[in-house]
Amino acid sequence: MRTRLPRKPLAAIGAVLAPLGLAATVTVATPQVATGATATYKLNYLTLPNGTRVPVRWNGCQAAVTWKVNLAAVPTAQRATVLSETRTVVSRISSYTGITFSYKGSTAEVPQVGSMVKQSAELVIAFTSPSRTNYALAGSVMGVGGYQSYWVSRTVNGRTSYTVAAVRGFVVIDTPQMLAQTKGGFGTGARRSNLLLHEVGHAFGLAHVSTTSQQMYPVLSSASPNGMASGDRLGLSKVGKGAGCINTSSMPLKDLS
């Protein structure tokens, strides 16, 4: 029997910043539309005011993406194991994207809607419970992941250029459900490592796919692949270091590395 455990991504948050040189006003923009080049991976795209659609990604040249973890809902005896698995997951995302990560230790933060602007690290992973967050950890949904992105425009001699970047990310996990319905370690099937890889994938620009052979398929089950599959890895490479540098110096949220 297949265990059906939906994993729900946050509708990627976008915001717009007034042209440089003017007073900056941040407002919530229309959520990005998920699309992609193949059936095995999908990226999140943002449509700019000029109609151009661009994939949302982190700055590939950032010195390091800082990250912290909240293990408060994990039983004390299991925290070392869960932390080790989490660090391995982030290390794998780093290898697939080429982006460097810097672990900054533990935190008591539990991501909430609107809280990413106040995070003490660029990525916060929280093992929590549905009552501690207002993200939709409801029913069989065990995890939610997403990011905060911005676009900045500059107009010079009548020509407007845009810069788009994701600058914060988060993952929240329904820990009691995770511990009851997943196994530890790495491998195929309903494992917490596969759950984490999926949600961190959302935080770094991947959307759900309809192909069951990929980790970004929205259901975690006994048939889930061992870690990120070929399409997942290809998608991460498209939004990683190889995609180039993004000048984020004018973004309202600064690089914390």
Image (tube, rainbow, N blue to C red):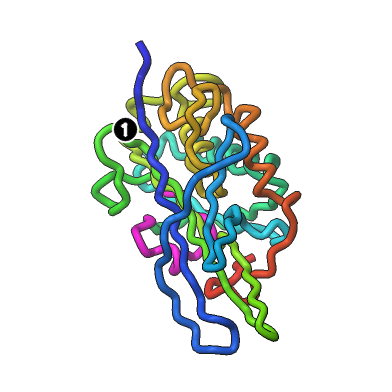
Which sits in the foreground, 218 or 134? 218
Magenta extent:
110-126
Which sits in the foreground, 144 or 205? 205
> Which residue is painted at 55% across and 39% down in the image?
42
> Which residue is painted at 53% across and 40% down in the image?
86
Where is residue 150 drawn, in percent x and y? 53, 66
Q: Quarter-wise, where is residue 130 in the image? A: top left
| Image quadrant occupied by the N terminus | top left
Q: Is residue 232 above or below residue 9?
A: above
Q: Is residue 113 magenta?
A: yes
Where is residue 116 drawn, in percent x and y? 44, 63
Label 1: few (<14), some (14–19) or many (≥20) C-alpha neighbours in 10 Å: some
Where is residue 31 drawn, in percent x and y? 42, 56
Which structural element holds mark 1? helix
Residue farthest to the top, as pictured? 1
Q: Amino acid at mark 1?
A: Gln
Residue that label 1 marks? 177
Q: Is residue 247 magenta?
A: no
> Which residue is painted at 59% across and 75% down in the image?
153
> Which residue is painted at 64% across and 76% down in the image?
160
Q: Quarter-wise, where is residue 157 in the image? A: bottom right
| Image quadrant occupied by the C terminus | bottom right
Where is residue 21 drawn, in percent x and y? 59, 89
Q: Is residue 203 above or below residue 24?
A: above
